[in-house]
Amino acid sequence: MKRILSISILLFLFACEEDKADETANESVNNTLDGTYKQPSNDWYDCGDGTMDIQYLTVDGLKVINWDYDADCAGDWDDCYYKESFNATKDGDALNVDLGDDLGNIVITRSGTNSLKIDYLDFFEYSELWPYESSKIKTYSPNCSDN
């Protein structure tokens, strides 16, 4: 009987250790920045006539893509998306993105569970929150370069 009790306790302890490992794995998955985010609706992107500039940001590992809809009030009214890709570097829980062409850098971090915080450095020096759209890495079409 003592053997059965000892074995049961050991099995219980090993089962608890596996649960802890699973929780740690789930935390690292949930802390990822991967997904699709929509540009915030605020005065900065309001075209003055009640319509908004429409942009999405997708993050897939170290690849960040900005999708800018051209048929909105800030575009040329072509029914397509401009796609601009950037490679990021990881710095702890943040992504550093060089925008190139002397536009500076951005740092992307998670803000709560439903937003990305984007810190614009060097040139602009401000921050904004992009609301979460989907855990899927969405693509948008048609691409304006295909026209």
Image (tube, rainbow, N blue to C red):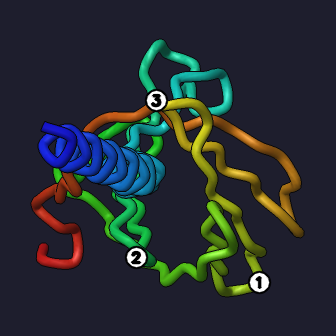
Measured along the vertical axis of the image, is residue 132 above or below residue 4? above
Amino acid type shown at disc 2: Lys
Q: Position of residue 13 (x, y in %)?
A: 33, 46
Q: Which mark is residue 62?
A: none
Q: Nearer the viewer, residue 97 or 76?
A: 97
In this image, 122 relative to 63: left or right? Answer: right
Res. 76 in view: no
Residue closer to the observer: 44 or 22: 22
Element at label 3:
loop
Q: Give the Cα separation between the discs numbered 2 and 1.
A: 20 Å
Which residue corresponds to mark 2? 63
Q: Residue at x 69, y 38 (%)?
A: 128
Question: Vertically, is 22 above or below 54?
Answer: below
For residue 102, the mark is 1
Residue at the front extreme of this rendering: 1
Give the residue type at disc 3: Asn
Query: Where does the image place residue 125, in percent across and percent down from the top left?
Result: 88, 54
The amino acid type found where label 1 is placed reads Asp
Residue labelled with disc 3: 114
Say which residue appears at 12% left-offset and 58% top-offset: 141
Q: Residue 134's spot in the image, x, y percent?
A: 26, 39
In the image, taking residue 39 as reference, residue 83 lies left or right, namely: left
The answer to whether residue 117 shows anywhere in this view is: yes
Q: Earlier in the sequence, mark 2 or mark 3?
A: 2
Residue 28 placement (x, y as % from top left): 44, 56
